[in-house]
Each structure stands twice: as C-alpha cells, then as structure tokens.
Amino acid sequence: MIKYLLHSVVSQRRILKVCGTGNRKIFFFFLFYIIGMPHERTRGDIFIAIRSRDLQSTAQQDFNNSGRFTLFENIQASDDEVLGVSLISATIPNSFYNLSNNNSNNKIKFKETGDTDYITLTIPSGSYDILELSSVIKTLLEANSTNTLTYTFTYDEINNTLNIKNSNPTVKNTTFDFTIEDSCRRFLGFKSQEISITTTNGITSDRAVDITDTRNSIYIRLPNLSNSKVLESSSGKFSNIIAQVPVALSRNSFFIFEPPTEFICELSQKQINSIAINITYQDETEAVKFEGCDWEINLKITFFKSHHIHEQQREYHHSLEKQLRRQVEQRQSRILQDHQDQIELNNFINQKLNEIKT
C-alpha cells in the first residue's frame, strides 16, 4: 500500500503543480492519513502475575504442573477490539526428573549367554548425568548377572558417546534389547535395536548421548484461551502453546526464562474470566512432574483494534483515495481546458485585429 501511494505521489507531481497549493495539501494529508494508521493498541495492557501455589490445582496426582486462576473481574474486549496474550517471564524449578517411570524411560532389558529370557531392570527415578546413570546401571547389571560378569562403562566426552564392555565377552555374551518403549537407550546413545557384546571392544553408542531424552524444553499452555496462531508439529494442528521454555541443565535450581522476542497470541474470544495453565513436554499428554516445587509465570493481556475493523478502514481509505484522485484529475482537466480555451480566444482576438488593420 505504501509503495503504491509513494508511486502515486511521483506520478501526480505534474497534477499537483497544476492544481495549486490547496489540492497539494489535500493529497498529502490523505497520504499521511493512510500510512499513519498503524494497528495500534486501543488501551493499556493488563499484567497478571501467577504463582502455582495460588491456583486451583487440576494436576494429576502430585505433578503440580497445571491449575486454574479465576479473575475477580472479567477482562472484556469491545466489539472493535481483539485480545492478545503473551508470556513476559517464567520462573521454573529444575526439579523434574529426566529419567522416571512417568517419563517412560527408566528400563533396561538384557540377557547373558545361558539365559532363556531377557531380564528387565528398573532404574530408580532421578535427575542423572551420564556418569551417574552409567554407575547405577553397572550396579544393576552386575547384581542381576547370571554369569557373575562385571561391566565397564566408558564415556567419551569429546565424541559424546558411551562404550559398554563385560568382563568375559568371548565366552559370555551380553545382549541388550533397546527396542522396548520405556528403554533408557537415548540416555546411553543407542538406536532402537538389539545389540550384543561379543568382543573385547564391547559396544559403542551409535548416536549422541542425550541425558534430556529429547525433553530439552517444556511448553506453557493456556487450554481455555483459544487461538489460531500456533501450530504444533506433534499433531499438525493449532495449539494452546504460548511459550517454549528451554530447560537449563543445572538441576535442583530455579531458572528464569524471558522471551527474547515478544510473541503476542491473538485470542478468538472477547472475554477472559479465568486462565487455565498446563505445563507439559511437547506431547500435550506428557505432563511435567515438578516434584512438589512451585513455579511462577507473568502474563500480559493486550487490546488491539479488530482486523475486521481494519479491513473496513482499508476499504474506506481505498474508496476515499479513488474519490480524491478523480477530483484531482477533473480539476486538472478543467484547468487544461480553460488554458486551451484561453489560447483559442487569444488567437481569435488577434485574427480580428489583423482583419481590421487590413
């Protein structure tokens, strides 16, 4: 639109010269009126500070990841306004376990030479680094070894891989089944497969060790505030997510997240009387278990002019522009015609004067 109007200014330069100062003022006032109409806020923002301890809990068991906050006074947009919501900041406790039964990633399944069936071991829930996890699994394997084998776990920090050996691989093999759904294989850096220790080289992970098990972000959702601005890759549908919060690696501490760029999610409803909050991993059904720790988030509610109103204004502005251009062109045509008439009149007068002289 602006490009079109600037082109109009250039193309109408000759007309403005002919039409004079008055029409020039009209034209440039119209130009300023059009390009000076931003999608502005209609009134002041509303800030809402929410603590999990103050919510009416809707969390399953003791996860402390969801709840509802009821406003003492409804937030209401007028007919020509839309509401927007954005996250200002979040204070999150890194208290959730990276490995647990809730996360479905706390099992390791193995068998040794002579075993008819696999043995499934359950790793205690906790927040592990790779060395701690290796030590716990080593203890479990050795305690359940039917061949009294010992195991060695070696972490290569440079390549971020893990090597596993047993004490007598040429005689007593060890096979791991990493195909089960609740396997801890991603922590150890293995693909979904069955793999055996058959040589003194042992087995080395074929992908990067990932102690987050792909849970490197948590998602703040507002289930009762609908929007059509966020798409979620897990479902391909519009989502109630308002922020993706990267998880800090420092466990048992609080981390503060402030979005580097403000993202205002436009809402479809005109009224807010309560705010439901749900904190999950990317899969909405996979709740974050905060182990009883509290969190805080700060939201901002913004009022904007309705896009529908803007469309009506644009149509009006377009119509007004066409009307003004037509008036300018008509004025130019009259001035040019007057000028031509004046020339013809002068020629006629000169002709008559010449006839009288002769």
Image (tube, grey):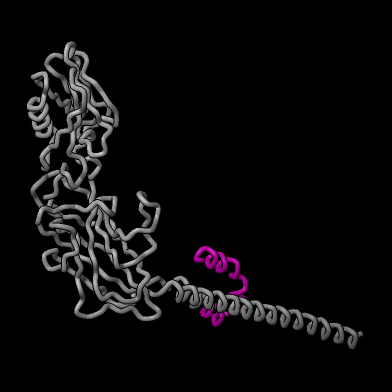
Q: Is residue 151 above or below residue 105?
A: above
Where residue 262 appears, as percent x and y from the top left, is 29, 60
> Which residue occupies 65% across, 81% down?
331
Q: Is 234 one of the magenta-colored residues? A: no
Where residue 144 appears, as percent x and y from the top left, is 10, 27
Residue 219 visible, this orientation: yes
Per the rendered image, the range of residues in magenta is: 1-26
Decide if residue 207 is on the left or right side of residue 162: right
Decide if residue 108 is on the left or right side of residue 78: left
Where residue 275 appears, as percent x and y from the top left, is 24, 69
> Which residue occupies 13% across, 57% down?
62
Residue 91 visible, this orientation: no
> Which residue occupies 39% across, 71% down?
39
Q: Is residue 108 above or below residue 271?
A: above
> Which residue occupies 27% across, 57% down?
243
Where residue 201 appears, as percent x and y from the top left, is 19, 15
Decide if residue 51 is on the left or right side of residue 273: left
Q: Quadrant of residue 356?
A: bottom right
Extreme residue toward the bottom, this view:
356
Q: Quadrant of residue 297?
A: bottom left
Decide if residue 75 is on the left or right side of residue 63: right
Asked whether 233 or 310 is in front, the reply is: 233
Asked whether 286 or 113 is in front, the reply is: 113
Extreme residue toward the right, this view:
358
